[in-house]
Image (spheres, grey):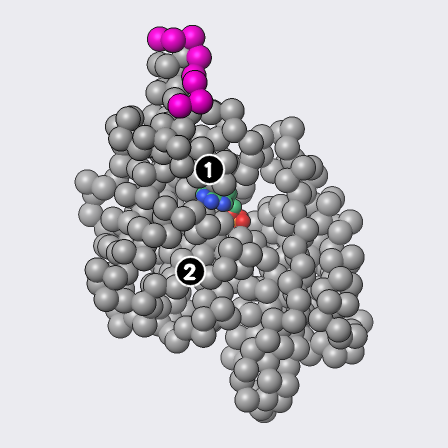
Amino acid sequence: MAEERHLTILGLESSCDDTAAAVLSRSASGVLSLRSSVVVGQTALHADFGGVVPELAARAHAEKLDHVVEEAMTEAGITRNEIDAIAVTAGPGLIGGVLSGVMLAKGLAYGLKKPLIGVNHLAGHALTPRLTDGLDYPYLMLLVSGGHCQFLQVSGPQAFVRLGGTIDDAPGEAFDKVARIMGLPQPGGPSVEKAARSGDATRFALPRPLLDREGCDMSFSGLKTAVLRQRDQLVAAQGGVTEQDRADICASFQIAMRDVLAEKSRRALALAKGITAFAVAGGVAANQTLRQALQEVATETDIRFVAPPLALCTDNAAMIAMAGLEKYLAGAVDDMSLAARPRWPLDQTASALLGSGKKGAKA
Ligand code: KG4
Ligand code: ZN
């Protein structure tokens, strides 16, 4: 039985602008050990374009992937022969990058004669708290990143029910756009959070979209446009924006984002059934104001709150190795017909979300 022996999984991730590889082992008794997690970003490559350029991203993944794999194996202190299975992001994401990863994984699986496991990138994020905190199923997950925003009831490695999600932009996209509007560097989330520290969050009354609507669907594009309007009004009235204006706008925006995500989390917690915890993942989960608000919402409902360390919230391959391991243990392995998928909703029964952001189609 696969469950009773020591297993080592190599994970690969290349669906957006991070090229990553990781080695995860599970002992015969089920103890997990993350032996390496290497992430090479592409921020500088796309800096002049105001967003991720798919062709540049794909080329960079193709160039870097095998180096990143070597580095992950060296760091873990293993040879290729010690790998029991290869897990790779097979979607959703920018197709050129996903293809680079899938092709390399197929080559490795074929050469080493080891099983190949195609992993859904979103499942990787959603299963991260199983790796970092050993959460038991089912739990509620708020996945909040540059490309995604959804509430998921996670009941197994392939059992996800989407309770709600954004109908337009993802919060990370809104943070990035606000940074651009205010002349702050990318990625926008950390810049806006830093600027907001010295700002007055009550100065600008920004909208809290969809709070008047039942359920936990969300919308953030209006909030972003409201920030643009406030900046334009300041420029028209005083010829520009001061450092203080900038800090106040960032603080007002961040608090509006926090209010929406906190209230929608309250509603998702009311909709979720029999959960053991409320967990958050994705790059925006790095935001301290948001983390604190979500912790408070969980405390109100007497539910455990889990936020993985930042390096495992943003894109990485450890989460892909973890999701691959769980699929492997469930007997769900793929073969050479594994396809790269630009769209791949986790909850196949939920109706499609509208819109498509700069980081690709919403799943
Ligand atoms: O999960 P991630 O690394 O990549 C994907 O989008 O899949 O998330 C990146 C996003 C960016 O939009 C970035 O601005 C945002 O996460 N982000 C933050 C913070 N750190 C990163 N947003 C708000 N506050 C932060 N501290
Ligand atoms: Zn991601």
Q: Nearer the viewer, residue 160 or 251?
A: 251
Residue at 56% across, 35% down: 186
Residue at 49% across, 65% down: 128
Mark 1, Cα crowd under 10 Å, few <14 / some 14-19 / many 20+, is some
**Quarter of image, res 107:** bottom right
Q: Please give left or right for residue 215 compared with residue 248 in the image.
A: left
Residue that mark 1 sits on: 194
Residue at 54% across, 84% down: 30
**Residue 176 is one of the magenta-drawn residues:** no
Residue that mark 2 sits on: 307
Q: Secondary structure at mark 1?
A: helix
Position above or below: 255 against 321 = above
Q: What is the three-letter code of the residue carrying label 1?
A: Lys
Task: State whether residue 332 appears in this view.
Answer: no
Q: Nearer the viewer, residue 242 or 21?
A: 242
Q: Secondary structure at mark 2?
A: loop
**Quarter of image, res 298:** bottom left
**Residue 238 is one of the magenta-drawn residues:** yes
Residue 303 image position (x, y, % from top left): 27, 67
Residue at 43% across, 18% down: 242
Q: What are the residue bounds of the magenta stretch?
A: 236-244
Q: Please give left or right for residue 76 compared with residue 131 in the image.
A: right
Q: Which mark is residue 313?
A: none
Q: What is the three-letter code of the residue carrying label 2?
A: Ala
Quarter in which the N terminus is drawn: bottom right
Residue 328 image position (x, y, % from top left): 57, 77
